[in-house]
Amino acid sequence: MINYQSINNIPKIKFNNSSNMSHYNPVTIGNLLTIQKVANEVNSQAQIFLIIGVGGSFLGARAVIDALTPYFCNKKGVEIVYAGNNMSGAYLKELLVYLDTKEVYVNVISKSGSTMEPALAFRVMKGYMEQRYGETARERILVTTDAEKGILKMIAEKEGYRQFVVPSDVGGRFSVFTPVGLLPIAVAGIDIEAFVRGGRQAELDFSGDSNSAIDYACTRYALYQQGYSVEILASFEPRLNKLHEWWKQLFGESEGKEHKGLYPSTVNYSTDLHAIGQFIQDGSRIMFETLIHFEEIDEDVDIPFSLDDMDGLNYLAGRSMNDINATSKDGVALAHEEGGVPVIRIELPKLDAYHVGYLMMFFMKSCGISASFLEVNPFDQPGVEAYKKKMLELLKEDVVNVRE
Ligand code: PA5
């Protein structure tokens, strides 16, 4: 299912798959039928589905949606837009203007219910929806949060919003197979049953004592021990840009603790070959590269034959763009290896819901195992709290200053 090629000269690390971490199963399947029913309702009632959330509360959904919907205008479903993942006033202002002529549903997603970015965006959007839709606003606001606690839970109860549950034992960056990811993905017209099936299959495939998820974790750790400090995730399909972002968060927030961990970085080829490619080939030897490739991508274009061949490209006539792209991937891997960058390859048969689910579960399993090598807890993020604390101190200082 996954073709995983490691690096030849990496020593095998002994890994005992009876450790708690390796048996962590992040899949908690929401009620797919309920989710699909609400997604159908959104599709029949709205032109815009606004997702309010930050970090793990939106990146998984966004990764899948971007990977599996068309580049230009998603005809399959409503348009998905995002808020609450930044603090830009300009973004929010322009969003409000953009929403004004379209029918809107809102899905606010926050496990804690108190994260500043989504909380501020939701306060603004709640007011907007109430002003625009009056009493019926509550039917258009969907809340995904903890089953029992948190400010968002309290607001949802008071206002009578429909609620979806983030399971208490699943952290944001591991939550794409819960309603956090599944509701937006279903609204985008993606087959959530196939996505979950892919995740479940990977869960089975990567549960034994010897498998590619363990190999990937072992290889990363071995390279880390050899002094490599950066892992670059690379792919050749721009649709995967947000999957990169999700991966970056998954590994960065799970492993970067106690002054340990690989720095997760991402590039999109061939675009970045003409930007950061020089550094990767020739600069400081601090990184290794993990190449993701989906062999089959539905849409493609053949290169036409040209009578005059003025651009000298007739030797490629009849070949498809995706085929040429795949060859460029092999060329890049060879060149980077020669340049002293170890390359791990992860190949999947097809860019579809099943295989994206499979890949995301592969990474989540591997991340848990990898963190156990570093002896850090992959499921907390104490470092994120530090900035929040400082920001709150400053904001509260501002309030005092304004009052004085
Ligand atoms: O992965 C994580 O746990 C974090 O990125 C959270 O998802 C993020 O901080 C948002 O938290 P919350 O869902 O509580 O608003």
Image: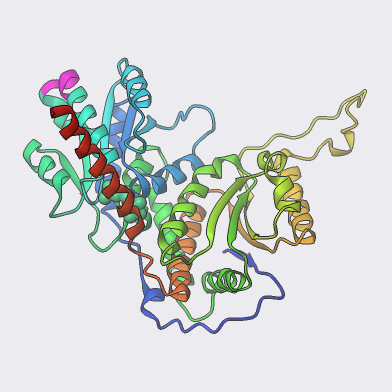
In terms of image quadrants, where is residue 141? top left
> In which quadrant of the rendered image does the N terminus lie?
bottom right
Relative depth, front residue between 363 and 45: 363
In terms of image quadrants, where is residue 2? bottom right
Would residue 389 be counted in the magenta stretch? no
Give residue 240's position: percent from left, percent from top.
Answer: 55, 45
In the displayed structure, 159 sits above or below 388; it is: above
261 sits left or right of 402 in the view:
right
Q: Residue furthest top?
A: 101
Relative depth, front residue between 388 and 83: 388
In terms of image quadrants, where is residue 304? top right
Q: Residue furthest left?
A: 158
Determine if residue 196 is in view.
yes
Give residue 106's position: percent from left, percent from top.
Answer: 26, 33
Give residue 318's position: percent from left, percent from top.
Answer: 81, 37
In the displayed structure, 237 sits above or below 340; it is: above
Taking the spot 69% from the left edge, 64% from the top edge, the residue there is 342
By secondary structure, the bulk of the magenta-drawn segment is best described as: helix
Taking the spot 24% from the left edge, 51% from the top edge, the residue there is 111
Taking the spot 50% from the left edge, 82% from the top edge, the residue there is 15
301 sits left or right of 246 in the view:
right
Colour mapping used in the image: rainbow
> In which quadrant of the rendered image does the C terminus lie?
top left
Give residue 119's position: percent from left, percent from top.
Answer: 23, 38
Magenta range is 130-134
